[in-house]
């Protein structure tokens, strides 16, 4: 189970890094390739033309925004699952320790950990 928790922490860290990068990408102009995609080898145009419109309508930027929204919609489910696992484990530990689970369930799962170790 420790390996799975480590994987969960690593995945959450990666998502945090992507969110930070996406935030930066939302405010920066898109990258222009050094060579046009038509294969002629000509240098890509650096003239922004209409930079605000080009930035707003950039398909790559829109894809980033869509992924960010998708992630934001899915993360609450992941948090709920992890909190549910934590709460279930907390209740089982409370029963094992002989505590009244009705009392133990009134507070946060961290409450008993702090009570039992006298922090």
Image (tube, grey):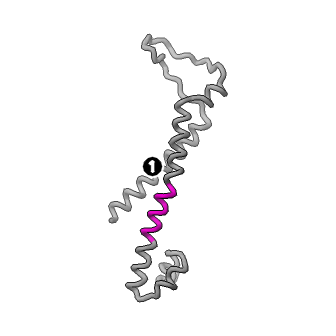
User: Taking 107 as reference, is 58 above or below it?
Assistant: above
On-image quarter of the N terminus: bottom left
Which residue position holds label 1? 14
> In terms of image quadrants, where is residue 84?
bottom left
Q: Number of numbered discs present?
A: 1
> Going 50% across and 54% down the picture, which residue do you hit?
75
| Tag 1 secondary structure | helix
Q: Residue at x 66, y 28 (%)?
A: 52
Q: Nearer the viewer, residue 61 or 3?
A: 61
x then y, percent, for residue 71: 50, 48
How far from the left and from the top, in percent, is residue 107? 55, 78
At x 47%, y 78%, the residue is: 113
Residue 90 % position (x, y): 44, 76
Q: In the rendered view, tell whether residue 93 sits above or below residue 78.
A: below
**The magenta stretch spans residue 79:** yes
| Closer to us: 102 or 107 | 102
Q: Main secondary structure of the magenta part?
A: helix
Residue 93's image quarter? bottom left
Q: For the point 47% across and 82% down, which residue is it? A: 117
Q: Is residue 24 magenta?
A: no
Q: Which residues are magenta?
A: 75-86
Instruction: Pinpoint residue 31: horizontal percent, then vertical percent.
Output: 53, 27
Badge 1 crowding class, 10 Å Cα cut-off, few under 14, some 14 to 19, many 20 or more, is few
Q: Give the vertical position of 114 relative to 81 (above or below).
A: below
């Amino acid at each position: 189970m420790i390996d799975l928790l480590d994987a969960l922490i690593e995945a959450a860290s990666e998502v945090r890094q992507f969110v930070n990068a996406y935030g930066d990408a939302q405010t920066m102009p898109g990258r222009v390739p050094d060579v046009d995609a038509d294969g002629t080898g000509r240098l890509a145009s650096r003239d922004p033309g209409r930079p605000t419109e080009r930035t707003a309508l950039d398909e790559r930027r829109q894809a980033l925004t869509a992924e960010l929204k998708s992630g934001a919609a899915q993360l609450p489910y992941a948090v709920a699952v992890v909190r549910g696992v934590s709460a279930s484990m907390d209740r089982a530990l409370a029963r094992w320790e002989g505590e009244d689970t009705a009392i133990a369930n009134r507070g946060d799962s961290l409450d008993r950990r702090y009570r039992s170790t006298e922090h």
